[in-house]
Structures are given as C-alpha cells and as structure tokens.
Amino acid sequence: MAAPADTSRRADATRKARRAERAPSGGWRTIAAKELADHLGSIRFFVLLLVIAGFAALPMIFRSSELSSDAPKLAGAPALFLALFVTAPQNFGGFTTVTFVALLVPLVGIAFGFDGINSERSQGTLARLVAQPIHRDDIVNGKFGAGIFVIGLMLTALVIFIAALGIVRLGIIPGPEELARVVLWLGATILYASFWLAFGLFLSVVLRSPATAALVGFGSWLGLTLFGQFLLPLIAGVLFPATTTTLGGYAYASTQTAQIFLRISPAFLYQDIVQAVVNPTVTTVLGYSNINQAIADQADRIPGLLTVDQSVLLVLPQIVVLFAITAAMFALAYVLFLRQEVRA
C-alpha cells in the first residue's frame, strides 16, 4: 500500500499539472493589444479621425469668428465657451459641433466592430485563434476592449483638438464648470459609441460576410439616426391605429408607445444627455429661439438653470438606460459567439 506522503505528492503533482493546463486569465489583454495595434496602424483609423475632426471643427471655426466680432456686447456672457459647441453659425443649416459628433459617432463604432469576428472566420484564422491556450470568451472581450480604447482615444484627441481650436480662435479660457461639462460630454459620447461598437460586434457574430455586416450596420445607423424620429412614431401608430370610435384612447396609447420607443432609442437617449450636460442655459425657459438672443439680451440674462451635479442627476436615468442597452447588446454578441461552432 502506498504511503500517505507518496499519495500527497502525487495529488500535488496532479493539481499542478491541471493548473498548468488552464488557459491564462489575461488572454483577453493579448487579444486586445493585437487588435489595438491593428486599429492604430490601419487606414480606417486615420480616415475616420480626419472626417470627424473636419466636420466637427468646421462649425466651431465659423462660430468663433462670429463671436469674436460680437465680443464687446457678449463680454461676461455665461457659458460662452460652451456656445462654440452647441450653437450653429449663420447660414450653416443649424448644424453644430455637437450635432456632427452625434451624427458621425455611430459610424465610428460600427466601423471598428462590424468585421471583428467574421473577418477572422473568412480568413480562416478563427479556428487557430480558438486553439490557442486562452479562454474562448477572451476573443470577444479583447476585441470589444480594443474597440472601446481606440474609440476613446480618437474622441479624446478630437475633443482636445476642438477645445484648443476654440480657445485659440476665441481667446478665452474655459472655467472649471465648462471643462467638467466637456469631460461629461466626452464620457457620454464614448458610451454612445460603445453601443454601436457592441452592435457592430453583434453583426460580425451573426453575419458571416463582413460586407453584409457593414451594409446592415450602416443602414441601421442611417435609419435610426436620420429617420428614427419619424419611423418610431409610425411604428407606434401601426401598433395602435386610431379609429373614429376609439380615437382618444388609441391616440393616447400610440403617443405613449412612441415615447417609450424614443426613450429606449440610443440616439434620443444620447440627445437628452447632451442637451442637459452641454447646454445648461435657460434659453428654452425664457422663450428664446437660440442662445444668441439670450446672451445678447443684457436685461434678461441669467447665468444658468442647472449646475453640473444637477445636470447629471437630471439625465441619470438616460445614462443608466444607455449603459444597460449597451451591456445587453454586448452580452447578446458574447453569448451567441460562445454558442457558435468553429470549424477549421
């Protein structure tokens, strides 16, 4: 009969061998580092950065020139630095820096996610990647983490560039509260882009062809961003059609359903967050059509309606819902990838 010491040594050796066979816990970091290097060295990164920077900086350049020409009567106006982000130049179609960023950020998220998995599958490298000593979920975690990092890096560089351009053009230094609002806007924009990144990753898991995933992703972006305000109430009207006999009840139900659709739409959630964080003035309360009239009217000028913490508390439900639907979209892509069969 074997001695107890020999049995203990064999048990220890067995446990050590099993631990050695386990996949390393930091495998997702290896995948993320590889994906990050690919993203930063790709033409896609520089093209998107130049496109977004160009469109976002253009309204600020014209707006800063207008504010500089009106500097004497705007001296001491509240949140003048934020006006560069939220007000549109004359004859510019109402487009602002915030508007362009909100319009183009989904494009960035989809562009860095739509070919995350299906490109590996089409190139025949997914089976070899799964065969490496890493957990299978490290693949999707690493790709999503690298996407968030490169998007955050791109948007941070963009905001710093735009803010520096505004300071140079306007010649004013923003206060701590204005800087805090710009940082909050940056965080909300990264969260909004993360939803579209998770959506693009979901498409890359479900659709085998990167071209098909790109077509569906960009089509969804155009549909929800440009036509969501018209399509969602139309869907609510189809679900609750109003008749002559039940006009009141069905009209109310249709309106409530449309509001629910809008409240769970990432684009409208992000719009509410930006409205409270970057544009805290009382122009709508005072009845002004734009911020120019408000800050030009010296008699009725009011510094602001909300502080930074009050603005955050006001849109905290929108932030939570946007984070929840982003996590749900990523979880859906995560589960579907783990359940897929990968063949060599």
Image: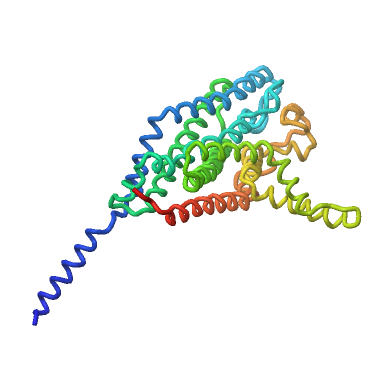
In the foreground, 320 or 133: 133
Residue 222 left/right relative to 28: right
Q: Farthest residue to the top: give it.
A: 69
Report the quarter where the N terminus lies. Answer: bottom left
Q: Position of residue 99 (x, y in %)?
A: 63, 32
Q: Farthest residue to the front: give it.
A: 344
Looking at the picture, the colour scheme in use is rainbow
Q: Is residue 193 above or below residue 246?
A: above
Residue 165 left/right relative to 240: left
Q: Position of residue 126 (x, y in %)?
A: 36, 45
Q: Farthest residue to the bottom: give it.
A: 1
Residue 211 left/right relative to 259: left
Q: Position of residue 203 (x, y in %)?
A: 51, 45
Q: Is residue 84 above or below residue 184?
A: above
Total marks shown come to 0
In the foreground, 181 or 71: 181
Residue at the image position 19 percent from the left and 62 percent from the top: 17
Residue 97 left/right relative to 299: left
In the foreground, 194 or 298: 194
Q: Quadrant of residue 106?
A: top right
Residue at the image position 68 percent from the left and 41 percent from the top: 228
Q: Farthest residue to the right: give it.
A: 245
Q: Quadrant of residue 276?
A: top right
Q: Position of residue 321 (x, y in %)?
A: 60, 52
Q: Is residue 142 above or below residue 152?
A: below
Residue at the image position 67 percent from the left and 17 percent from the top: 69
Residue at the image position 65 percent from the left and 39 percent from the top: 223
